[in-house]
Image (cartoon, grey):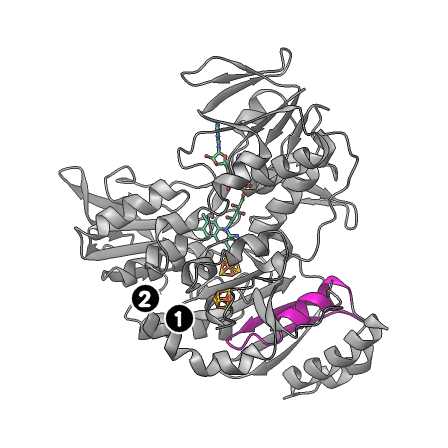
Amino acid sequence: MSFLNIFKSDSTRRTVLSSGHVVPESSRCVQCGICSYNCPIGIDVRAHVWRNESVNHSECLTCGECVARCPRGVLRFAQTDLFERRES
Amino acid sequence: MRYVIIGAGVAGFAAIESIRSIDKTGEVVMVSDDPHGFYSRPGLAYYLTGEIDSKALYSRSKDDYRHLNFSFLNARVKRILRAEKKLELDGKPALAYDKLLIAVGAQAIPLNIAGAKLQGVMKLDHLTDANDILAFTKRGRTAVVVGGGITALELTEGLLARGMNVHYLLRGDRYWSNVLDARESQAVEARLQEEGVTLHHHVELAEIIGKNNRVAGIRLTDGHTIKCDLVAYAVGIAPRIELANECGINCERGILADEHLQTNDENIFAAGDVAQVYDPLTGHSVIDSLWNPAREQGGVAGWNMAGRRAAYLKSAPFNVTRLAGLTTTIIGSVGRGRDEDVMGIARGDSETWRELPEALVAQGGFDVNHIRLLIGDKRLIGAVLMGDQKLSFPLQKMIANGADISPIRDSLMQPNAPVADLIADFWMKWRENIAA
Ligand SMILES: Cc1cc2nc3c(=O)[nH]c(=O)nc-3n(C[C@H](O)[C@H](O)[C@H](O)COP(=O)(O)OP(=O)(O)OC[C@H]3O[C@@H](n4cnc5c(N)ncnc54)[C@H](O)[C@@H]3O)c2cc1C
Ligand code: SF4
Ligand code: SF4
C-alpha cells in the first residue's frame, strides 16, 4: 500500500479516529491475509483475528483500510471503552 | 506421548494449538504431503486475482510455530498400521503414534472424460495448483471453466483478472441451483456477463481436445467445439477417506467421527473436511467443507487427544463469500436437492444448506441488495444476503441462537414486506433483551 492511499483514506480516518478501534468477528475469518497485506503500517491484523482479539495496537492509525477491504465482513470499528462487553 | 497429525490444514493446526494448551511436553509431529505447509486455502482465490501475494497466504508466523514446539514432516502417508500404531510414509521411515488425528481434507473430483489428463487441465485445491494456473495464464488467452459452487466462480474471476477470455459451461439452466434461488442465480450470472464471461447453459463437456499433449480446445456433447488453452474444473470435492477406509476405520461419505471427533479406534480422531461428524442435536452425521467448522473440529479433537473430554457442537453453517463480485452471506438451511454442476459437495459448502425443513420464504430487496429468509414455525432457519451486508452479523446471531421471531413472523410473510427493516428493528430489540 502506498502513501497516496493513506491520504485518500484521511477523511474516513478522522471520523473513525475518535470512535474507536478494530474488533473482529472471528468465526467469519478465513485467514486470507487481505487485512494484514493492506495495513499501511504492517500490523498483523489477521493474527489478532485468529486469537479473537481487538486490534489494540498503539500505532494503529484507525485508517479503516483493513475494515474496508476484508471480503468477509469480519472487522468493524467499536467504541473504545475500557469496560467494553464482548458480544458473544 | 507422541501425537501425530496427518494434514497441514486448519484442522490440523488448530489441533496442535489445543494439544499444546494442555500438554506442554508431549511430542507433536505434523505430517503433510503439501510442501507449502499451512496456509489459507480460501485465500487462494485472492491470490489468483492478484489481490494478495503468495506470502500473504501464510497465516501464522515463525514465532507461532516456535511457540507450539512441533515438528513438520513433508511426506505422504501411505498406510495406517493400526495394530502397530504406526504410519507408513512415502520415502521416509515409519512413524509411530500414540494418538493420531486424520485431517487430510477433501480433494477436487477429477473430470472423467477423454483428455482430462492433458496439460492445461486445472483444479484449485492447493497452492501448487494456483501457481500452475498462474503459470499457464501467462501463455494462454482463452479458458473454459466447468462446474459449480464457489470454486468455479473463483476460478472464473481469477482467470479474468489475469486477462483471459473465459467461457463458463453450465449443465443446467442456472448457477448453483440447489443453494441459490432463481433470482440470486440470475444476479450472479448478470454480473459475470457484465465482466465479459461467456455463459453457456444446458451444455455438457464431452471431450478435451489436445495437441502435443496440451489443451487445444473442448468438444461439447452437442458437437460444438470451443478453442481454448486451459480448462479449469470444480465439479465437486470428495473427502480423502482412502487411508481410513483401508485400515478399517468406519467411513460413509467422510470418516465417521462422534461428537468428540473420535473414530471407531479410540486412538484415532478425524476432523475438518474429511470428517463426517455426528451432531447430537439433529442425530445426523454431516460433512462441511468450511474453514471455521474445520478449525473448531480440529480444536476439539486436539483437546480430546490430550485427555480433556470435550464435545463439538455444530453451529448453523455459515459462509460469506464473493460471487462474481457480489458479497454474499449464506446461513443455515437455504436450498434443496441437487445441483447438476457439482457432485457431492462443493468447496465452501455445507450439506446442511440443503436440509430444508418446512419453511416459508420471505424476500426483500432488489437486484443487487437482496435478502431471502427461510422462516420456520417460530425461528429463522436460513438466510441469503447479497450486496449490502449490514444484516449479515445480526442474522448469523439470530439464526445461531434460535431467536423467537413470532412477533414479526406475520409481517415478514406479507407480500412486499420491508423484510430488511423488520429484521433490523427486531434485532435491536432482541439484542437488548439478550443483553439484559
Ligand atoms: C479455492 C478454495 C476456496 C474456498 N473457499 C472457502 C470459503 O469461501 N469459505 C469457507 O469456509 N471455506 C472455503 N474453502 C474450504 C476450506 O478451505 C476448507 O474447509 C478447509 O481448508 C479444510 O481444512 P482441513 O484442515 O480439513 O483440510 P485441508 O486444508 O484440505 O488440509 C488437508 C491437508 O492434508 C494433507 N494430506 C492429504 N492427504 C495426505 C496424505 N496421505 N499424507 C500426508 N498429507 C496428506 C494435505 O496436503 C493438506 O495439507 C475453500 C477451499 C478452497 C480450496
Ligand atoms: S481480510 Fe478478513 S477474512 Fe481475510 S484474514 Fe483479514 S479478517 Fe480474516
Ligand atoms: S485501521 Fe488501518 S492502521 Fe489500524 S490495523 Fe486497520 S489497516 Fe492497520
x, y percentage for residue B90?
Answer: 43, 19
Q: Mark 1: which amino acid?
A: Glu
Q: Mark 2: which amino acid?
A: Leu
Q: Quadrant of residue B401?
A: bottom right
Please determine if labels 2 and 1 lie on a single subunit: yes
In the displayed image of the protein, which residue is found farthest to the left? B212
The subunit carrying tag 1 is: B
Magenta range is: B373-402
Q: Quadrant of residue B298?
A: top right
User: For the C terminus of chain B, which image quadrant?
Assistant: bottom right
Q: Is residue B401 magenta?
A: yes
Is B15 rendered above or below residue B87? Answer: below
Tell me the number on the disc at residue B189.
Answer: 1
x, y percentage for residue B12?
Answer: 57, 36
Badge 1 element: helix
Q: Is residue B80 magenta?
A: no
Residue at mark 2: B199
Is B197 rendered above or below residue B18? Answer: below
Badge 2 element: strand
Position of B165 with respect to B73 (left or right) is: left
x, y percentage for residue B182?
Answer: 50, 72
Nearest to N terminus: mark 2 or mark 1: 1
